[in-house]
C-alpha cells in the first residue's frame, strides 16, 4: 500500500467517526451569533419619553416625512462612510433591498438623460470573482450579463477592468471593497485610485460600492480603505458611484438600518424615485440607533465588542487550517483582519468537500456560489462562515473540514 493510500484509509476512518456523531451545524451564511445579538439588546429601550421622539430638526419620528432620514442619522452614517450628510440616504433594514431597488430603477427607468437598461440591446455588469452571491443574484434576476473579473490580493484585476469598460454595454461593477465576501481582501489604495479615475464608455456606468464591512475589524491592527468619493472627485467621476452599508451585523440583522450615498445627479435621481416609492422609512429605528451609538465613534467603539466575540472564532478557523493543511500544497487561503468570512481554495475539489461535509452534518455555502451563475470553472473556492457556531462547534467543524479536504485531494491522486 502506498503512503497516500494508507493516509486515505486513516482519514476515511476518522471521517466515519465524525459521521457517527450526528452533527447538525449550519455554516452556510454569515449570520451573527447569539452573543453578538445580545450586545445591542439595550437599544430596544432607548426611546423612553416623548422627548426621544423629536429629531434635532423638530421632526416627530413617529409621523410621516423625512424621506432621506433624520438629520442626526444621516450625519452619523455619513461619518462612517466618509461622505457629507447631505449625500446620505438612511433607509430600512436591508442594504440588499436598496441595491435591488437601485438596479431595478436603472433597468426600468434609467439615469437622467440615459435610456433605461431594459431598452438597450445588451447590458453587462462586471463581477469580481470570487464575490458575493447575492449581488450576482440581483443582476441575474434582471437578465444582465455578468462578466467575471479575477480578484487579486490587492482587489479586482484593474488591467482587465480598464479593458472591459471600453465596451458601452458594460453598465456597472459590483464591489465589496473592504474585507471582501468571501475572500476577506481589502482593495489597495492604487486599486481604489484606478477605479475612481475610470472613464467608462457608458455614461450610465455605476460602481456599486457595497462597503458592508467598513467597521468590522477583528483587532486594532486592521486594514484601511481609501475614500472612493474623495478620489473620484479629483477626476469628476463622483456620479458613477453609489455606496452602501448597514448595521445588519452591528445591531440587529432583521431590524438594523441600511444606508446609501451618492453625489450630484445620481443622488437626485435616487431621491426622485424614493419620493414615488415611499413617504419615509422607519425613523423610530433610526432614532434608536442614534440614541444608542450617538455617533460614528460610538459605532467604532461598539464594534470592538463584536471583535472580542469573533476573534476567537476566526482564530479557530485559521489555526486549524494551518495546523492540518499548512505546507501540504493542498489548499490556499487568505488571513483576513476583519469581515465575516474565510475563503479556502482547493482546485478541483470544492464540490466533493462540500458534499462530504454535508453528509457528516456540517452545512456550508454551496460550491460555486461565489461565482456568477453558480459556476466555479475551477471548482475550487469555498466560503467558511465562522460567526454563528460556538467555538466548540467550530473546532469540530474545522477538524472535519480539513479531513474532508485531504480525502478529496488524495482521492484524485490515488
Image (cartoon, grey):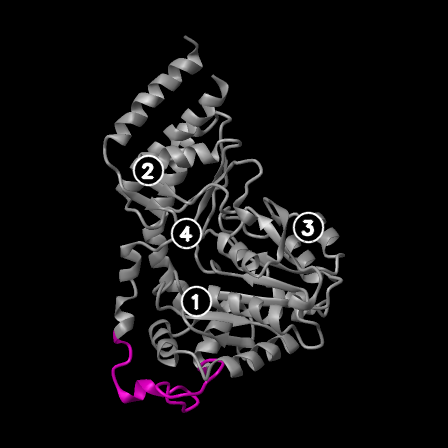
Which class describes the residues within 10 Å of circle 3: few (<14), some (14-19), or many (20+)? many
373 displayed left or right of 364:
right
Q: Depth check: give the residue in front, 338 or 17.
A: 17
Q: Main secondary structure of the magenta part?
A: loop
Q: Does dot 1 land on a helix, a strand or a loop?
A: loop
- Nearer the camera: disc 3 or disc 4: 3
Give the mark nearer the N terminus: 1 vs 3: 1
Residue 278 against residue 313 in the figure, above or below? below
Which class describes the residues within 10 Å of circle 2: few (<14), some (14-19), or many (20+)? many
Q: Give the residues drawn in magenta, as a range.
A: 45-70
Say whether residue 56 is magenta: yes
264 displayed left or right of 31:
right
* Residue pictured at 39% horizontal, 28% vertical: 324
- Nearer the camera: disc 1 or disc 4: 1
- Nearer the camera: disc 4 or disc 2: 2
As measured in the structure, the alpha-carbon distance from the residue carrying label 1 to the one carrying label 3 is: 30 Å
Q: What residue is disc 2 on?
A: 397
Amino acid at each position: 500500500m502506498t503512503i497516500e493510500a494508507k493516509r486515505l484509509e486513516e482519514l476515511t476512518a476518522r471521517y466515519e467517526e465524525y459521521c457517527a456523531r450526528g452533527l447538525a451545524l449550519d455554516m452556510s451564511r454569515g449570520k451573527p451569533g447569539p452573543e453578538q445579538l445580545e450586545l445591542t439588546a439595550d437599544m430596544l429601550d432607548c426611546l423612553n419619553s416623548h422627548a426621544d421622539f423629536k429629531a434635532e430638526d423638530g421632526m416627530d419620528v413617529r409621523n410621516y416625512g423625512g424621506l432621506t432620514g433624520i438629520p442626526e442619522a444621516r450625519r452619523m452614517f455619513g461619518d462612517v462612510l466618509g461622505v457629507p450628510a447631505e449625500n446620505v440616504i438612511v433607509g430600512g433594514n436591508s442594504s440588499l433591498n436598496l441595491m435591488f431597488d437601485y438596479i431595478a430603477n436603472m433597468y426600468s427607468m434609467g439615469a437622467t438623460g440615459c435610456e433605461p437598461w431594459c431598452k438597450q440591446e445588451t447590458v453587462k455588469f462586471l463581477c469580481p470573482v470570487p464575490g458575493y452571491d447575492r449581488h450576482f443574484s440581483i443582476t441575474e434576476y434582471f437578465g444582465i450579463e455578468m462578466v467575471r473579473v479575477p480578484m487579486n490580493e490587492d482587489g479586482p484585476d484593474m488591467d482587465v477592468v480598464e479593458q472591459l469598460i471600453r465596451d458601452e454595454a458594460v453598465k456597472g461593477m459590483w464591489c465589496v471593497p473592504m474585507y471582501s465576501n468571501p475572500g476577506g481582501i481589502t482593495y489597495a489604495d492604487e486599486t481604489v485610485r484606478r477605479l475612481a479615475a475610470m472613464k467608462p464608455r457608458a455614461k450610465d456606468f455605476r460602481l456599486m460600492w457595497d462597503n458592508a464591512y467598513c467597521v468590522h475589524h477583528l483587532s486594532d491592527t486592521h486594514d484601511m480603505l481609501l475614500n472612493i468619493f474623495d478620489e473620484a472627485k479629483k477626476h469628476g467621476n463622483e456620479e458613477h458611484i453609489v455606496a452602501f452599508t448597514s448595521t445588519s451585523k452591528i445591531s440587529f440583522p432583521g431590524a438594523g438600518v441600511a444606508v446609501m450615498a451618492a453625489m450630484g445627479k445620481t443622488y437626485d435621481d435616487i431621491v426622485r424615485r424614493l419620493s414615488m416609492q415611499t413617504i419615509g422609512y422607519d425613523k423610530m429605528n433610526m432614532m434608536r440607533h442614534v440614541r444608542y451609538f450617538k455617533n460614528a465613534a460610538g459605532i467604532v467603539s461598539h464594534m470592538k465588542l463584536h471583535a472580542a466575540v469573533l476573534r476567537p472564532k476566526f482564530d479557530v478557523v485559521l489555526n486549524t487550517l494551518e495546523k492540518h493543511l499548512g505546507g501540504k500544497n493542498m489548499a490556499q487561503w487568505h488571513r483576513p483582519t476583519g469581515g465575516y468570512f474565510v475563503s479556502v481554495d482547493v482546485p478541483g475539489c470544492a464540490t466533493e468537500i462540500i458534499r462530504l461535509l454535508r453528509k457528516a452534518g456540517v452545512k456550508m455555502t454551496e460550491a460555486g456560489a461565489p461565482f456568477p451563475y453558480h459556476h466555479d470553472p475551477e471548482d475550487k473556492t469555498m466560503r467558511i462562515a465562522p460567526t454563528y457556531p460556538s467555538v466548540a462547534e467550530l473546532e469540530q467543524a474545522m477538524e472535519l473540514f480539513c479531513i474532508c479536504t485531504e480525502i478529496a485531494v488524495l482521492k484524485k491522486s490515488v
